[in-house]
Image (tube, grey):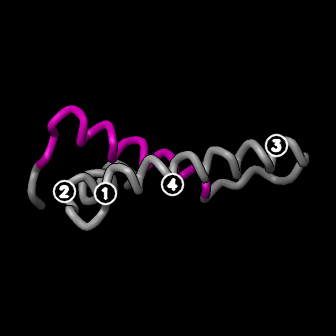
Amino acid sequence: MPKTIARILANDDAVGSDELEAAINYLDAKIRDAEFRDEPFPFLSYRNKVIFEATLELRRNGYMVKT
């Protein structure tokens, strides 16, 4: 399912690559902060980070297929 979502986002002009990079940085910080505070692992943050990273990878490799 994350691959499907990443493909949809990769084709969505409303979501900018800069916005995705900012979201990835924020989510990465949130995950590290939880680890530092010895809190439960924020799975949804990790899931979204993986989706956004896959979206950027698809865009950078030119994989743009209209769905």
Nearer the observer: mark 1 or 2; the answer is 1
Q: In which image quadrant can residue 36 be found?
A: top right
Q: Position of residue 32 (x, y in %)?
A: 74, 42
Q: Secondary structure at mark 2?
A: loop
* Alpha carbon separation for disc pair 3 and 2: 33 Å
Q: Is residue 67 magenta?
A: no
Q: How many marks?
A: 4
Q: Which residue is mark 4?
A: 23
Task: Please identify the quadrant where the C terminus is shown.
Answer: bottom left
Q: Which residue is mark 1?
A: 16
Specify the amino acid type for callout 1: Gly
* Alpha carbon separation for disc pair 4 and 2: 17 Å
Magenta range: 45-64
Q: Earlier in the sequence, mark 1 or mark 4?
A: 1
Question: What residue is drawn where x is 62% and y is 44%?
Answer: 28
Q: Quick check: 43 left or right of 55?
A: right
* Alpha carbon separation for disc pair 1 and 2: 10 Å
For this orientation, the residue located farthest to the bottom is 14
Q: Earlier in the sequence, mark 3 or mark 1?
A: 1
Q: Position of residue 56 (x, y in %)?
A: 33, 42
Q: Earlier in the sequence, mark 1 or mark 2?
A: 2
Nearer the observer: mark 4 or 2; the answer is 4
Q: Which residue is mark 3?
A: 35
Task: Please identify the quadrant where the N terminus is shown.
Answer: bottom left
Q: Which residue is mark 2?
A: 11
* Alpha carbon separation for disc pair 3 and 1: 29 Å
